[in-house]
Image: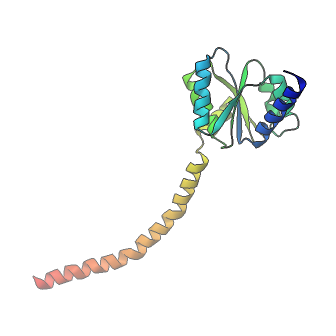
Amino acid sequence: MDRAQKEQVVEELGQIFESSGVVVVAHYEGMTVAHMQDLRSRMREAGGSVRVAKNKLAKIALEGKACASIADYLTGMTVITYSEDPTAAARIADKYAKDNEKFVILGGAMGDSALDPAGVKAVASMPSREELIAQIVSAIGAPASNIAGAIGAPASNIAGILTTLEEREAA
């Protein structure tokens, strides 16, 4: 790899570290090509990506970035998973680590916050953006439906009473 290629890799990694909602760093020593392809396809389905890069180039790309503290995790055979969705990469990486003991999560970053393995697991358990939006919409809509039900209830109660009175008179 010549100097121009290295500079391009550093630039690409810098963009990844700046634009990603979450970045997860893991060891992948002993994983087969099939395992790595499986990880890549799972990540792609969730809207994320997987990147293997030289640790030295990744550390250079981290200089001056908000998530520079994850440089300590870049030792040995590391792989970087990332996504714009703040939970997708963490969720897929966590699930994959449970299925494959050779994939070991070292930590990561969410914005300018460094995450240890427990932090990555906590982010993985958070609901996705779409799920949060659905929860907010249902929380906003619930009081409106309760109000509509309360307003409609007296009218239906009166109608029921009138029907009962008519049935009594007819009998």
What is the count of numbered marks? 0
Residue 97: tell me if it is visible: no
Vertical order, 99 against 144 (above or below): above
Is the residue 32 above or below the residue 96 in the image? above
Residue drawn at (61%, 49%), measured in percent from left and top? 129
Give the x, y percent position of residue 128.
59, 45
Q: Is residue 66 left or right of residue 49?
A: right
Farthest residue toward the top?
30
User: Given the current orientation, which residue lies at the most extreme bottom position?
Assistant: 169
Q: Residue 80 at what x, y percent from top left?
A: 71, 29
Q: In the rendered image, is residue 171 in sight?
A: yes
Describe residue 124's horizontal placement relative to residue 8 as left or right: left
Residue 31 percent location from the top left of the image: 63, 17
Residue situated in front as seen by the camera: 2 or 53: 2
Front-most of residues 34 and 164 = 34
Q: Quadrant of residue 94?
A: top right
Q: Quadrant of residue 37?
A: top right
- In the picture, which quadrant includes the N terminus? top right
Q: Is residue 104 left or right of residue 148?
A: right
Quadrant occupied by the C terminus:
bottom left
- Can you give x and y, in whole percent of width and height, for residue 10 in the image? 84, 31
Task: Classify residue 18 as left or right of residue 153.
Answer: right
Tell me the quarter of the picture where residue 15 sits.
Answer: top right
* Depicted 79 relative to depicted 22: above or below: above
Residue at the (57%, 21%) spot, across then down:
100
Residue toward you, 103 or 145: 103
Using the image, determine if residue 12 lies above or below residue 159: above
Q: In the displayed orientation, state which residue is furthest to the left.
A: 171
The residue at 45%/67% (across/down) is: 146
